Image: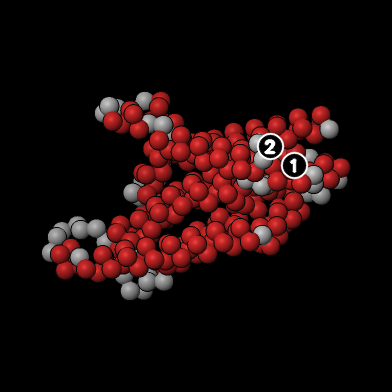
Amino acid sequence: MNTSAVARLEWRRLIVRPLAWVLAAITLAWLAWNFTLLMGTFLASQMQRAALPDSPGFTDLVAVPLLAQLVQLGFMVVPLLTMSVIAGERRSGTLPLLFAAGVTASRIVLGKYLAVLGWLLLWLLLTLAMPLALAHLVNLDWGKLAAATLGLILTLAALAALGIACSTFASHPAIAAAAALVITLALWYVNLGAQMAGINGGAINWLAMSSHLQPMLRGLVSTTDIVWFVLLIAVSLTLATQRLSAERERG
């Protein structure tokens, strides 16, 4: 069994599990409601903004805030989605079957990661469809929207990698979800104390996920921010693979 076969198997499990559908329905309904509220505020302030030079437009007031809300939901959704990826297999006794089929730890981790990432990208695409549906009626800043979308893709990919790593190390899915949530929040707020002290640079700010996502939400893309997310994804998947390899060797 190769990586694509593991990914297809995990994707089918996501499709048949009620949790994935419930999460998608609740979050998309919440995002649609907030999109309506953002549109109402945007239309109500249209006359005032027309009199101001360089006033924020649809992208700044509706599209990007909607994507920012998706990030906040991702902190809760991704741990719930990934908690059973490995820990659930281990708890149900099906993980040894994958080992017995000759599937390497790296293929298991990568295949499951690709399946979860595919679900998250579909979730993002459905969210993007809301502002894009009005693209013919409003002036979209395509560059800023593309930068924000790139930031969302990298963030969701990093959250998925963290969730799978926690699921690999945890003995129970609930523990995996709690650990992923705590680590995610810690990475997001690690520089909060430094910001309150007026320190905007330094290593602690570089460690914070918010320091790398927020510039992209403002339309600024830098190699440093992209590298940070790639490193986080690589480290998380490497740790998960090593943990699973050690478990396979122990039998």
Q: Residue 240, percent across and down?
A: 66, 36
Residue 46, numbered label? none
Q: Secondary structure at mark 2?
A: loop
Taking depth in this image into account, of 128 and 173 the one nearest to the observer is 173
Q: Residue 45, percent across and down?
A: 20, 65
Sequence-first disc among 1 and 2: 1
Q: Secondary structure at mark 1?
A: helix
Q: Residue 239, percent across and down?
A: 64, 32
Residue drawn at x 73%, y 35% is 244
Amino acid residing under circle 1: Arg
Residue drawn at x 19%, y 57% is 54
Residue drawn at x 84%, y 45% is 97
Colour logic: secondary structure
Q: Does the image show residue 175?
A: yes
Disc 2: which residue: 171
Residue lying furthest bottom in this view? 137
Circle count: 2
Number of other residues with Cα within 10 Å of mark 1, as a class: few under 14, some 14 to 19, many 20 or more: some
Number of other residues with Cα within 10 Å of mark 2, as a class: few under 14, some 14 to 19, many 20 or more: some
Residue 163 falls in which quadrant of the image?
top right
Give above or below for 151 relative to 24.
above
Query: Left of 32 or right of it: where is 123?
Result: right
Residue drawn at x 20%, y 58% is 55
- In the rendered image, the quadrant that contains the C terminus is top right
Query: Left of 82 or right of it: where is 214?
Result: left
* Mark 1–mark 2 CB contact (< 8 Å): yes
Amino acid residing under circle 2: Ser
Disc 1: which residue: 90
Residue 9 falls in which quadrant of the image?
bottom right
Q: Does the image show residue 161?
A: no
Give above or below for 99 relative to 46.
above
Q: CA distance from mark 1 to mark 2?
A: 8 Å
